[in-house]
């Protein structure tokens, strides 16, 4: 019965797609004709609204919509074809490619799973300790790997913990919900920590020209604060019960020369990213040193036969990279057409006189709840170029407000459709949707308060 409903729902969405597309076109045209601004600004606003509605309604696939940005910008005369397509070769995109390549090396040789099992053995049979180690490692790996891939890898281990409560087949529903939700939310929070951890981070980094080390200096303390607070909120809401578990083995894992090479390249790459501010002048590279390191990592992994090209292709998320390019191109079109400045004036006209802390809180809250329904990448791509002029008018560095938007876009915890990690744990049928919504809503409010306070008081 569930499968039938899913199929019928999918057919319904397919039937609605043409009408949603027509709706997006109609609204874009209305904006184009009715906004009191210059022709170029009206075209930029119309394109912005059209692309934004396509991303929100998903009348077209997100990646296809991203490809529409340079296409329509060229047709409307807003940007030359060469300039529009150059967004898809932005250095940040190649930086993310390096992150995918490192994840491919870890996954191909089973190093990610081996590390997870090692951490579980450190728990010495204590279920609570095992859960904390598992979630902590999930957050750590999500800094360097796709959040989705990390949860997909860790989920079988988490389900194994659920089956070992007091020797029974299953544990208490509250404990199940705590373990699975903590796993999904750890991946989302951990992904905030680095530029390659989550797509919105890369969009802000590309827009603001921030280095890998600078981003970590901003975001890692936020991760270190949000992760334990997330566990505390889940604990207070769910009141889980823990007991002893058996220690999982990893007998099939054997060390090899290829694994040694993979670990060495991974550690050297991370070291170079973190120490880029000191290494770049020594090598004589003045800009985009992080991207150079990422490209070197890809070449090293392939050159030393750590991974094959087919391994890289399998783990390279080309759609995400194209979505980056579309988001960057949209920001360039908004700036070049004057649409960003026009919208910023409207926003400023409505918020002038309000306290800065209230403005920041409203922006963070809007991003958090918007991302419950819209891709976090699409949210960042839409809002970062729009709100950058607002930050300048508030005497706040655009980089800081952009970082707040990116981090807020990773705080969608309420709905299964909000993030792939949420969907993965919900698909186990062990987390009721009301439970996820109740816990997620509380976490959304907590993250809004924490992020707004950090932007206003610390950054």
Image (cartoon, rainbow, N blue to C red):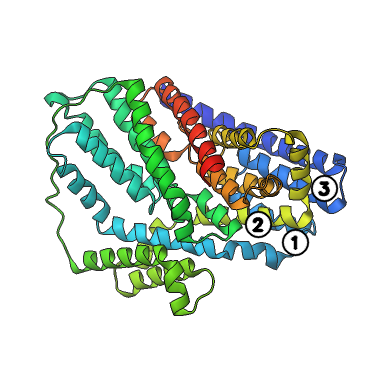
Q: Secondary structure at mark 3?
A: helix
Which residue in the protein does label 1 denote?
Answer: 79
Q: Residue at x 76, y 34 (%)?
A: 350
> Disc number at residue 188?
none
Whole-percent x, y for residue 459 in the image = 53, 47
Side (left or right) of 416 relative to 55: left
Which residue in the protein does label 3 denote?
Answer: 42
Q: Residue at x 54, y 65 (%)?
A: 91
**CA neighbours of label 2 inside 10 A, class few (<14), some (14 to 19), many (20+):** many
Question: Do tag 3 and tag 2 residues touch (Cβ < 8 Å)?
Answer: no
Q: Is residue 390 above or below residue 128?
A: below
The answer to which of 300 and 228 lies nearer the viewer is 228
The quarter of the picture where the N terminus appears is top left
Q: Earlier in the sequence, mark 3 or mark 1?
A: 3
Q: Secondary structure at mark 1?
A: loop
Q: Which residue extends farthest front?
A: 457
Which residue in the protein does label 2 denote?
Answer: 329
How far separated are the C-alphas under marks 3 and 1?
Answer: 14 Å
Whole-percent x, y for residue 383 in the image = 64, 44
Q: Earlier in the sequence, mark 3 or mark 2?
A: 3
**CA neighbours of label 1 inside 10 A, class few (<14), some (14 to 19), many (20+):** many
Side (left or right) of 102 relative to 110: right
Q: Is residue 319 above or below residue 371?
A: below
């Amino acid at each position: 019965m569930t499968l039938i409903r899913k199929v019928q729902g999918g057919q319904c969405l397919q039937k609605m797609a043409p009408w949603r597309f027509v709706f997006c076109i109609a609204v874009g045209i209305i904006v184009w004709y009715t906004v009191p601004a210059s022709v170029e600004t009206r075209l930029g606003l119309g394109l912005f609204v059209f692309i934004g509605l396509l991303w929100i309604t998903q009348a077209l696939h997100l990646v296809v919509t991203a490809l529409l940005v340079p296409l329509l910008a060229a047709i409307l005369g807003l940007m030359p074809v060469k300039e529009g397509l150059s967004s898809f070769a932005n250095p940040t995109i190649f930086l993310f490619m390096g992150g995918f390549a490192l994840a491919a090396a870890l996954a191909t040789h089973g190093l990610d799973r081996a590390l997870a099992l090692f951490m579980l053995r450190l728990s010495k049979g204590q279920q609570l300790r095992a859960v904390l180690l598992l979630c902590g490692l999930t957050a750590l790996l999500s800094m360097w790997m796709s959040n989705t891939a990390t949860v997909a890898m860790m989920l079988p281990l988490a389900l194994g913990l659920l089956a070992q409560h007091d020797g029974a087949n299953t544990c208490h529903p509250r404990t199940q919900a705590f373990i699975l939700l903590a796993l999904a939310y750890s991946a989302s929070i951990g992904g905030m920590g680095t530029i390659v951890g989550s797509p919105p981070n890369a969009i802000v980094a590309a827009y603001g020209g921030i280095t890998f080390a600078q981003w970590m200096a901003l975001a890692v303390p936020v991760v270190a604060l949000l992760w334990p607070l997330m566990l505390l909120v889940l604990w207070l809401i769910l009141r889980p019960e823990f007991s002893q578990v058996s220690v999982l083995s990893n007998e099939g894992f054997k060390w090899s020369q290829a694994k040694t090479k993979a670990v060495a390249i991974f550690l050297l790459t991370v070291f170079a990213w973190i120490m880029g501010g000191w290494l770049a002048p020594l090598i004589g590279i003045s800009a985009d040193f992080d991207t150079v390191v990422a490209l070197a990592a890809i070449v090293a992994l392939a050159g030393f036969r750590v991974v094959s090209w087919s391994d890289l292709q399998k783990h390279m998320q080309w759609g995400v990279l194209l979505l980056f390019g579309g988001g960057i191109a949209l920001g360039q079109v908004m700036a070049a057409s004057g649409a960003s400045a026009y919208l910023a004036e409207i926003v400023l006209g409505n918020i002038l006189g309000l306290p800065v802390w209230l403005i920041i809180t409203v922006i963070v809250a809007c991003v958090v709840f918007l991302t419950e329904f819209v891709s976090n990448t699409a949210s960042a791509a839409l809002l970062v170029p729009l709100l950058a002029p607002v930050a300048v008018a508030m005497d706040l560095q655009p980089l800081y407000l952009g970082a707040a938007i990116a981090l807020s876009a990773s705080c969608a915890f309420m709905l299964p459709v909000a993030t792939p990690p949420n969907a993965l744990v919900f698909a186990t049928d062990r987390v009721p949707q009301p439970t996820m919504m109740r816990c997620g809503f509380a976490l959304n409010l907590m993250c809004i308060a924490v992020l707004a306070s950090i932007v206003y008081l610390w950054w």
